Image (tube, rainbow, N blue to C red):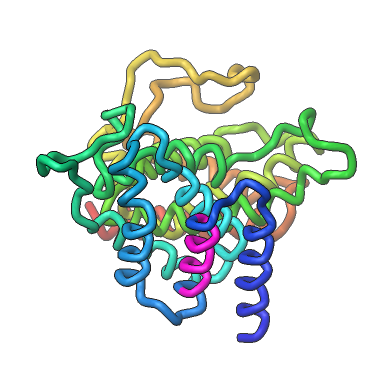
Amino acid sequence: MAHIRESITAWADAAHISNYYQDFEHRTVDTFQSVLEGKTPSNAAAGTISSLYGPLIKRDSQSCPIGEVWVIFCHAARAVGGNSDLTERLVDLLNSIAELPDVTDEHGNAIFPEWKSYGGYWGKLPSFAATFRDYGTYVEDKELMDIGEVWDSQAVPLLNATTFGAMCLDRGKQSANMSFHALVGISEGVEAPYRTPEDFRNGAMFIPSAATWILLAGKRIYELCKSNHYREDHVRRFVENEADYEWHKDMGYSLERWAFWKKRFAEIKMTQGLQDDVKDLAGRAFIKMSEVESHMK
């Protein structure tokens, strides 16, 4: 238990170092820390966050720094998401925020951010999905890393954030567009080729994430495939090395793509050159997909 407390404290201390945070953002970090330490229930913490940011939203919904709440979520998930109990507490907190009543103006009308498609405060978790993409599952390109930084060091934070995202997809009150993040994560992990040492290095980064989406939210992902969620015929993949990817058909979810992912996990399990722990995760994902199929057909 001591090392868990230490990891929570280390994350909170690092968050407080920010030179840009104002008092209410430091108080937000303290609230998260209290939830992670099991001292404050998620519904009470959500109420605290609402009391901190509600007046700011009413004063100026367009410039309210609600995005910092989501950034704090992402940083916390990347730091402590390797622990399932702590991740569950973060998911519970996000669910509690999604259940908060609407923030309304003096006429009782719900207040929306500048981009109304994000939804209102708080139920639609406005801009959380975009923030999770940019701060949760984001991986810096090798060419953009600062001198002295190690690209491979991003693997654990990515896996931690994926664990949080998969648990949100599986039992979140709001989807927070996690189905999109799952699609990207699985695609990056199993549709890429694994033939060269550089491929194997990429695999150590992205295959565990792809497997985690399946292991923690496999049933939900199968349902998305059955409903052809996000499916767009003849839409190309927007990556520089598109031709190298193994999947060349329609983007989005489909049962055909599910079957392809399952086949690729089996192939990855047998691929020489990949790390054993990576191959083991691929094998577990293959088994999970078979179990989901047998239970849902």
The foreground one among 161 and 170 is 161
Residue at the right extreme of this rendering = 148
- What span is in magenta? 25-34
**Number of numbered labels in the structure image:** 0
Magenta stretch: helix, strand or loop mostly: helix
Residue 168 sits in quarter: bottom left
Judge from the rendering whether residue 7 lies leftward or rightward of residue 178; answer left or right. right
Q: Residue at x 32, y 46 (%)?
A: 125
Residue 37 vertical position relative to residue 78 in the rendered view, above or below: below
Q: Nearer the viewer, residue 134 or 220?
A: 134
In this view of the protein, can residue 273 be seen by the observer?
A: yes
Residue sitting at x 28%, y 43%: 58
Q: Is residue 28 magenta?
A: yes
Q: Nearer the viewer, residue 136 or 241?
A: 136
Q: Is residue 162 visible?
A: no
Instruction: Give percent across and percent down for residue 181.
Output: 45, 40
Q: Nearer the viewer, residue 5 or 222?
A: 5
Expressed as whole percent of the image width and height from the top left, the position of residue 2 reads: 65, 85
Splitting the image into 4 quarters, where does residue 48 fall? bottom left
Give how far across and how far down residue 246 sits, in percent.
56, 27
Residue at point 79% right, 35% down?
145
Query: Relative to 150, is 172 above or below?
Result: below
Q: Quadrant of residue 146?
A: top right
Q: Is residue 189 left or right of residue 47?
A: right
The spot of residue 53 in percent (x, y) is 37, 52
Residue 277 is left or right of residue 218, and the answer is right
Q: Residue at x 33, y 60 (%)?
A: 51
When the figure is inspected, residue 82 is found, relative to residue 104, above or below; the finding is below
Residue that extends furthest to the bottom in the rendered view of this protein: 1
Q: Would you say 184 lies left or right of 244 here?
A: left
